[in-house]
Amino acid sequence: MMATNGKDNCEGTKMNGVVSAEVSTLHSELQNGHDNSTAPTDNSSSSRFTFSPEPTMEDIRRMQAEFTDERDWNKFHQPRNLLLAMVGEVGEVSELFQWKGEVAEGLPDWSEAEREQLAHELSDVLIYLVELAEKCRVDLPRAVLRKMALNKLKYPASKVHGSAKKYTEYTD
């Protein structure tokens, strides 16, 4: 399990040298039982799940950089090590799904404890991904925009609608 497993006290987390009101508010909500991060979602096709607007990816990068700096862990948090740690966390996510068969969107058959464990493990994966991108100097939000544009060219909706084939399998 990653060192940033949520057991540390979030109060006083600094972003840009000041205490973040958003993190303090989130911490208060978590303490008061108002966390919706693992709540079941509506499975109807007309309602899509959305992420909360805060924290941003840059906020996550900053919080993790501060966490790492405070512990003098940068000597350990180099690209190869971060990648291997992230793969280990993906393995922990996989363990949660192992032997469950097909799992419905929204995880309606999962207990609250299972949802919470999944939230922790997915958070670990994201934190390592963001830190790996930082160390490799990859601006993830911009890289995602470029990749989505490439995917639209590779997989035009008119050609691939309803099919799971790889782009190399399509003929003009």
Image: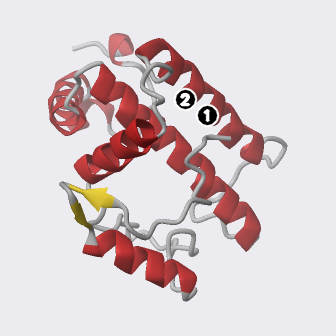
Give the amino acid type for the residue marked by disc 1 in the picture. Val
Tell me if mark 1 has few (under 14), some (14-19) or many (20+) residues whose alpha carbon lies within 10 angstroms of its own. some
Q: Is residue 105 above or below residue 65?
A: below
Q: Is residue 109 visible from the viewing direction of this image? A: no
- Residue at 60% across, 54% down: 120
- As rendered, which of 14 and 158 lies closer to the eye? 14
- Residue at 18% across, 24% down: 150
Task: List the single residue furthest toward the right.
Answer: 99
Give the amino acid type for the residue marked by disc 2 in the picture. Met
For the residue labelled by badge 1, is the local secondary structure a helix, a strand or a loop? helix
- Residue at 65% across, 64% down: 116
Q: Tag on residue 119?
A: none
What's the image's color scheme?
A: secondary structure
Name which quarter of the figure residue 103 lies in: bottom right
Find residue 153 and report its horizontal and vertical position in percent: 16, 25
- As rendered, which of 101 and 111 lies closer to the eye? 111
Decide: marks 2, 1 in contact (CB < 8 A)? yes
Q: Is residue 154 visible from the viewing direction of this image? A: yes
Name which quarter of the figure residue 99 lies in: top right
Q: Is residue 94 above or below residue 134?
A: below
Tell me if mark 2 has few (under 14), some (14-19) or many (20+) residues whose alpha carbon lies within 10 angstroms of its own. many
Find residue 128 and report its horizontal and vertical position in percent: 46, 34
Q: Tag on residue 86?
A: 2
Task: List the single residue furthest toward the bottom.
Answer: 32
Kindly identify which residue carries mark 1: 90
Name which quarter of the figure residue 162 lies in: top left
- As rendered, which of 22 and 126 lies closer to the eye? 22
